[in-house]
Image (cartoon, helix red, strand yellow):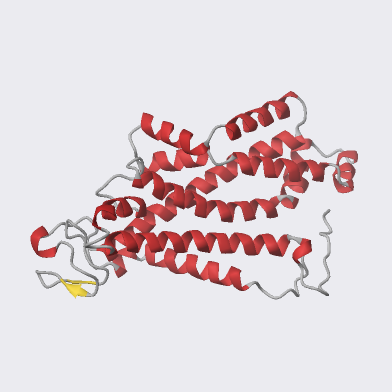
């Protein structure tokens, strides 16, 4: 583990600042929006109002309006609630499934471990995008379905990561000592192996959040995710794809927000990975090993 004296990574700060800022605006959507995101007033008087302009009814729109006269600024932050929540919940589900599968396969060897690894390899062999489209096509599209589909198709990489880390830890002297003292497999897994294999999982989760949010937007863009009139960044981009010439702000606003969130998650994940990689330590910085190992 890198020494505590190592200076903080600027990427970490930038990524966290972006995530916190966008998350706060999404949380305060009813306060900062000013309009009902699904309201459709006089469409003829309000449709395609450009950013920083007033519509035909006198209402001011910071980011303009779409083809139905709905305020893009309001829909952006109400849609952020859906997209961010979906991404985080899907990643949490993947994290729980992958962590459990990898840990059980590494600690409880034998037929159970072989079965879990075979299941993981089989799931990895199926293209995720194809599986996403198949699952979404069999059920009515909804936010809950997107969370389940993304969570159930994103755990395999985490399982393999945890399995490799836990297998290496099982050969360490402190695990052998715990077994010699009569520690049960369950106690060894939860008290010794899990805490010491948590760091790479956190890094994978940070990178996975951005991926899950991008996939949710992709499914919503294809009409297989959150359905209108509920707003999400994906269906906002889809609704603005036909107006890129005369009203580019309709798709541009959620597109930029999506890029910022994915980039922020990537920055946080890369910074965490570099801080936990001994080979990335700055010259002259001591690298020590946790006492628990």
Which residue is painted at 35% across and 46% down in the image?
220
Q: Nearer the viewer, residue 181 or 256?
A: 256
Residue 213 appears anywhere in the view:
yes
Q: Is residue 95 above or below residue 31?
A: above
Residue 190 placed where, x, y %?
72, 44
Residue 253 placed where, x, y %?
33, 64
Q: Residue furthest front?
A: 245
Residue 83 placed where, x, y %?
40, 53
Q: Which image quarter is the N terminus in?
A: bottom right
Q: Is residue 10 above or below residue 48?
A: below
Which residue is painted at 27% across and 59% down in the image?
244
Which residue is painted at 75% across and 37% down in the image?
106
Residue 194 placed where, x, y %?
72, 47
Q: Is residue 284 left or right of residue 202?
A: right
Q: Is residue 220 left or right of residue 287?
A: left
Q: Is residue 141 above or below residue 282?
A: above
Which residue is painted at 60% across and 68% down in the image?
12
Residue 77 appears anywhere in the view:
no
How many numbered marks, from 0 up?
Answer: 0
């Amino acid at each position: 583990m890198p020494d505590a004296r190592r200076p903080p990574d600027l990427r970490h700060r930038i990524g966290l600042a972006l995530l916190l800022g966008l998350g706060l605006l999404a949380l305060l959507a009813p306060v900062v929006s000013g309009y009902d995101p699904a309201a459709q007033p006089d469409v003829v008087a309000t449709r395609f109002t450009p950013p920083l302009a007033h519509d035909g009814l006198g209402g001011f729109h910071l980011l303009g309006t779409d083809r139905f006269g709905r305020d893009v600024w309001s829909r952006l932050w109400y849609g952020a609630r859906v997209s961010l929540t979906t991404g985080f919940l899907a990643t949490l589900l993947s994290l729980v499934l992958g962590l459990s599968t990898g840990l059980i396969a590494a600690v409880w060897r034998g037929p159970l471990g072989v079965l879990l690894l075979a299941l993981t390899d089989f799931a990895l062999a199926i293209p995720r995008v194809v599986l996403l489209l198949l699952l979404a096509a069999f059920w009515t599209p909804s936010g809950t379905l997107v969370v389940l589909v993304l969570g159930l198709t994103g755990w395999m990489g985490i399982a393999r990561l945890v399995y490799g880390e836990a297998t290496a830890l099982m050969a360490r002297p402190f695990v052998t000592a715990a077994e010699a003292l009569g520690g049960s497999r369950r106690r060894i897994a939860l008290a010794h192996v899990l805490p010491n294999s948590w760091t790479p999982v956190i890094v994978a989760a940070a990178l996975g959040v951005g991926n899950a949010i991008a996939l949710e937007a992709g499914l919503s863009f294809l009409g297989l995710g959150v359905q209108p009139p509920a707003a999400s960044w994906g269906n906002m981009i889809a609704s603005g794809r036909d107006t890129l010439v005369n009203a580019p702000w309709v798709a541009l606003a959620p597109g930029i927000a999506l890029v910022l969130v994915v980039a922020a998650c990537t920055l946080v994940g890369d910074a965490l990975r570099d801080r936990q990689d001994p080979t990335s330590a700055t010259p002259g910085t001591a690298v020590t090993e946790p006492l628990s190992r």
